[in-house]
Amino acid sequence: MSDATLHNLQERVKELTVQLAVANAAMGNQTAEYQKAQEQIHAYERQLRKLASELCLTEARERKAIAEDLHDHLGQALAFIKMSVAQLRGNAVFCGFEGTFDSVMTLLDQAIRYTRSLTLEISPPALYELGFEAAIEDLAERFQRKHGLSVEVESQSEKGQFSEEVTVLLYKSVQELLTNVAKHARAAKSVVRIGREGHLIRVEVEDNGQGFDVAAVEHAGGDDHFGLLSIKERVKYLGGTMQVRSTPGRGASVVLLIPSSA
């Protein structure tokens, strides 16, 4: 190999080395920018989950305040009116208005029952007074009465109070899952299991309905008619996970796992 040829090769190697160094530097910059963008995306996701959680808690507190107002004002007013009407009812026999009073008493009873039912729907007192498990048992009874869906509650852990955030978000998630069962599953029975897995709170909602294609639901994108995406994000914010198992024709099971210290 001549000296000129060797010199040309050496120069070519130098040029390629410089080009490679420039390419590596550019790639390094792109990688750093990509990592920065990913970190920003994760930060935005955390902020969105936090906002969603705060919105859920704010809604729950507003519902609680409205329910208390209904109970303390409208509910008590109706009860007082009923007592007053009952006192006048005795004189109605002599005035020929007994039938009218009977109709009024019936309407008052209906209004009182509706107010109590509406209060429970808006914000169940058991959730704040007796805790999560008692509220779920009350929820199960209401689903039986309203939808004809048999809901069994199995508790495998010692009863205890969770934080307000965990209590509200878990209750809302179970309520939405049972609503899915009542509306979509065509199930006769559902079971809510409450327990522990180490330091995790474990809540499972299982039904014997028609089931569904999990992959199809997960890839539905914005068409989240089962509400599973919102539940998943809610649980993820608390540092937990959601596991969905279902096969068409063989029922479904959704397991929520949340740190007890969340």
Image (cartoon, rainbow, N blue to C red):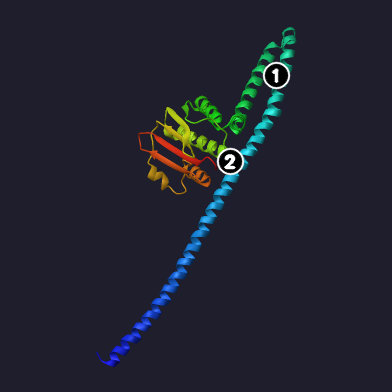
Say which element carries label 2. helix
Say which element carries label 1. helix
Q: Is residue 119 left or right of residue 212?
A: right
Q: Give the mark nearest the N terminus, 1 or 2.
A: 1
Q: Name the residue under label 2.
A: 165
The residue at the far top in this view is: 94
Q: Name the residue under label 1.
A: 82
Name the residue type under label 2: Glu
Q: Where is residue 175 in the image (x, y as percent from the top left)?
A: 52, 35
Q: In this view, does 158 lie above or below 88?
A: below
Give 246 or 31, whichever is nearer the viewer.
31
Residue 64: numbered disc: none
Q: In this view, does 148 lie above or below 225?
A: above
Question: Residue at (58%, 42%) from the top-left corner?
Answer: 56
Q: Is residue 214 left or right of residue 134?
A: left
Give 17 or 120, whichever is nearer the viewer.
17
